[in-house]
Image: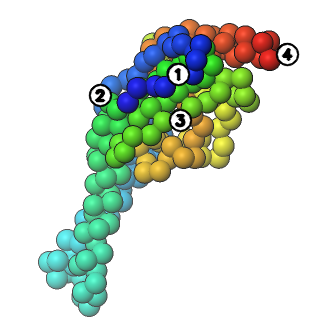
């Protein structure tokens, strides 16, 4: 995918999120929960399969493997999905907007007018990496991006980029320039 620019618009920065496997603060809860989930379902399946549990509904032999697959995805699979999804993401900051291109299954593009963005937020880390967010966080703000469908509930963001504070300042300066031009 390539970003389509309006006449007079130009790209002032482009980048990608951190590549490779990554843990987020949400994983402090999600990983132990997934491990417990998988352990409990595996134990029930094992007890049912070996005959230790009496009077097991035959449907349980269909349902339990599904719950095991869900547990495996929560514990391990989502990290692979997240890694693959981030490999396909490209961020652009132009003289008029922030553009996020990506898509795990099919290409998609989000374009945020900097002049109309209600707020631009910055979350940084000590290593210089961070996130520049365009809009307000709602109650789903702690949802990891690796959960299916999470991006539709989260505000658009340049997630986990290098030199994030500089990009944040650049986005704010561009927004101020656009707002001055409009008045």
Residue 167 lies left or right of residue 17; in this view the side is right
- Please name the residue that numbered disc 4 is placed on: 183
What is the spatial separation of the Cα atoms under label 1 and label 4, in whole angstroms?
23 Å
Are the two marked residues, 2 and 1, in contact with CB atoms closer than 8 angstroms? no
- Please name the residue that numbered disc 3 is placed on: 110
Are the two marked residues, 3 and 1, in contact with CB atoms closer than 8 angstroms? no
Mark 1 or 4 closer to N-term? Answer: 1
- Quarter of the picture containing the C terminus is top right
Mark 3 or 2 closer to N-term? Answer: 2
- Which is in the foreground here, disc 2 or disc 1? 1
Q: In this view of the protein, can residue 94 be seen by the observer?
A: yes
Kindly give the residue lying farthest to the front in the view shown.
Answer: 7
Residue 171 placement (x, y as % from top left): 62, 15
What is the spatial separation of the Cα atoms under label 3 and label 4, in whole angstroms?
26 Å
Q: Residue at x 49, y 30 (%)?
A: 100
Crowd class of label 2 (few under 14; some 14 to 19; many from 20; radius 10 Å)? few
Residue 98 placement (x, y as % from top left): 57, 24
Mark 2 or 1 closer to N-term? Answer: 1
Mark 4 or 2 closer to N-term? Answer: 2
Please say if 12 is above or below 123.
above
């Amino acid at each position: 995918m390539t970003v389509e620019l309006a006449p007079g618009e130009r790209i002032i920065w482009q980048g990608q999120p951190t590549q490779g496997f990554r843990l987020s603060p949400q994983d402090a809860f999600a990983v132990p929960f997934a491990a417990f989930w998988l352990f409990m379902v595996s134990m029930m399946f094992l007890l049912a399969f070996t005959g230790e549990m009496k009077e097991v509904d035959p449907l349980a032999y269909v349902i339990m493997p599904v719950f095991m697959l869900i547990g495996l995805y929560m514990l391990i699979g989502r990290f692979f999905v997240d890694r693959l999804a981030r490999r396909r993401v490209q961020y652009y900051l132009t003289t008029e907007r922030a553009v996020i291109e990506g898509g795990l299954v099919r290409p998609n593009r989000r374009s945020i007018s900097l002049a109309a963005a209600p707020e631009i937020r910055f979350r940084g880390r000590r290593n210089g990496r961070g996130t520049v967010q365009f809009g307000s966080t709602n109650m789903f703000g702690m949802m990891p991006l690796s959960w299916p469908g999470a991006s539709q509930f989260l505000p658009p963001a340049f997630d986990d980029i290098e030199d994030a504070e500089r990009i944040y300042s650049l986005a704010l300066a561009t927004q101020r320039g656009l707002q001055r031009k409009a008045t």
